[in-house]
Amino acid sequence: MRLQRFPRASADSARDLNLFTGSAFTLATQVATYGLAGVTGIVLARALGPEGRGVYGLAVTIAMVYAAVVELGMSKAGVYLLGQGRYTRQQVASSNLAWALVLGAPWLAGVLLVGLLKPDLLSDDFSKAHLAIIAAGGPLLLLLVLTQDLIIATGSVLGYNVVDFVQPFLRAVFIIGGLLALGAGVTGVLAGWLLAVAAATALALWLLSRRVRLRPAFRADLLRAQLSFGIRGSLGFILQAANQRLDVFLVAAFAGSAVLGQYTVAYGTAELLWQIPLALGVVFFPKVASLGPEASAETAAVTCRRALFVTLAASAALLLLGRPLILLLYGRAFEPAVTAFYILLPSASLYTVYKVLSNALAARGMPEAGLYGGLVSAPLTVALGLLLIPSLGMAGAALTSVAAYGANAAVVLVCFLRATGKPLQDVLMLRRADVSSSLRAARALLRPGTVGVE
């Protein structure tokens, strides 16, 4: 076991990133940011009510889905190609910046045109101001993703996490300040969200500028390589985004904004556990993308079973705390969300399996594994959503989501086992050595001055 000074949250390259240290640092940051987001969500729910909270959630979701769809996997492809040593930081950064500019302009113009001609196209509760904020927010989110992922691909876990913390922190300041000091409504709250995204994007660009020149430019061979890798992965990512967000649109369509606001609370509470695989994934993909096939497979198997154990243990704790937490923080108006929350609870464990193994396969040059899962789960989401949501409301949406996550995890697990030849127990069954190793690393992490590294 090698010892290094703590906190050292960055490395000279992605290959040198430490999974335990980087993931622990990222998880601590995400817990803090999730806490900020939770406080902001509570204030939003109490100040705007279920209907206003639903309008805010729908607007932000639209901008996020746009950024996820048009990004086309360019960011992850850049990380992979950089990890494989095929292109330089400058070349990948220039390509990412150019992509953000090329794809952002049509969205901005198109949504603004909709706002002028038919502002109620998406929802009767939307105004021209809401659409203007969505129009600007989408391209900013796209640029943020393309920039932030490249920061960690150069070895800077610290820089990545600073950007990750700034956005929810400023969002809390702007939104809560606007609600409490200025009595802002939905439009003011969305404006606060937009300012926070813009500030985080500016910070990410500044951090990246310390490593490369901010010079947008396409290079034909790099663009082809990014699109070849990215499209295969992004098609799966689009279907995964559909699994995660289609239920939002279906609840809005069949149950209305008030129920959507309650479902958003249930979903957000269950997503507390998602911080574990999400934090791990931030460091995991750049790391394994720089390893050989055998080392990558072994790292993935060990990481999956350890992360799954941690997620299951955390799920058991949240099972006991979920109902009082929702009632205490959000009030009796959101009590119907409790049932949906309990249904959604297993989603974190299923997502952990999917997140680790799909990243491992992408790092082996197989980003299409997520597509295979999506081809099974997306139709399942639509079919079950149309069947269950009209009759069961948000409980039907929760059941639909869990079924989709289960299908995703199962498909990606099969793909990983076939690609690597690993037995099932190596991926899912915790070993005594895993527990002892994790405890040693945790004790070293807490010991002043040093941290244990596997």
Image: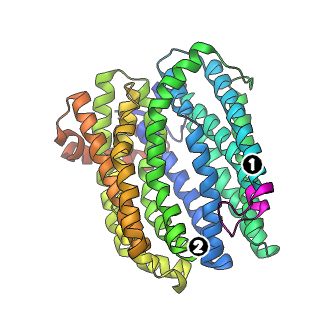
Q: Residue at x 53, y 29 (%)?
A: 11
Q: Nearer the viewer, residue 252 or 438?
A: 252
Q: Quarter of the image containing the C terminus?
A: top left
The answer to which of marks 1 and 2 sits earlier in the sequence is 1
Mark yes or no: residue 450 visible: no
Across and down, in percent, residue 93 comes to: 65, 25
Instruction: Decide: is 277 above or below 93.
Output: below
Instruction: Decide: is 240 above or below 338.
Output: above
Across and down, in percent, residue 109 comes to: 77, 43
Q: Quadrant of residue 373?
A: top left
Q: Residue at x 32, y 33 (%)?
A: 299
Across and down, in percent, residue 340 comes to: 40, 72
What range is drawn magenta here? 116-131
Q: Which residue is mark 1?
A: 136
The residue carrying pointer 2 sits among few (fewer than 14), some (14 to 19) or many (20 or more) residues within 10 Å by Cα, namely many
Mark yes or no: residue 273 visible: yes
Numbered disc 1: secondary structure: helix
Q: Main secondary structure of the magenta part?
A: loop
Q: CA distance from mark 1 to mark 2?
A: 23 Å
Q: Quarter of the image containing the N terminus?
A: top left
Q: Does 122 appear in magenta?
A: yes
The residue type indicated by label 2 comes to Ser
Numbered disc 2: secondary structure: helix
Q: Which residue is mark 2?
A: 257
Q: Does 440 appear in magenta?
A: no
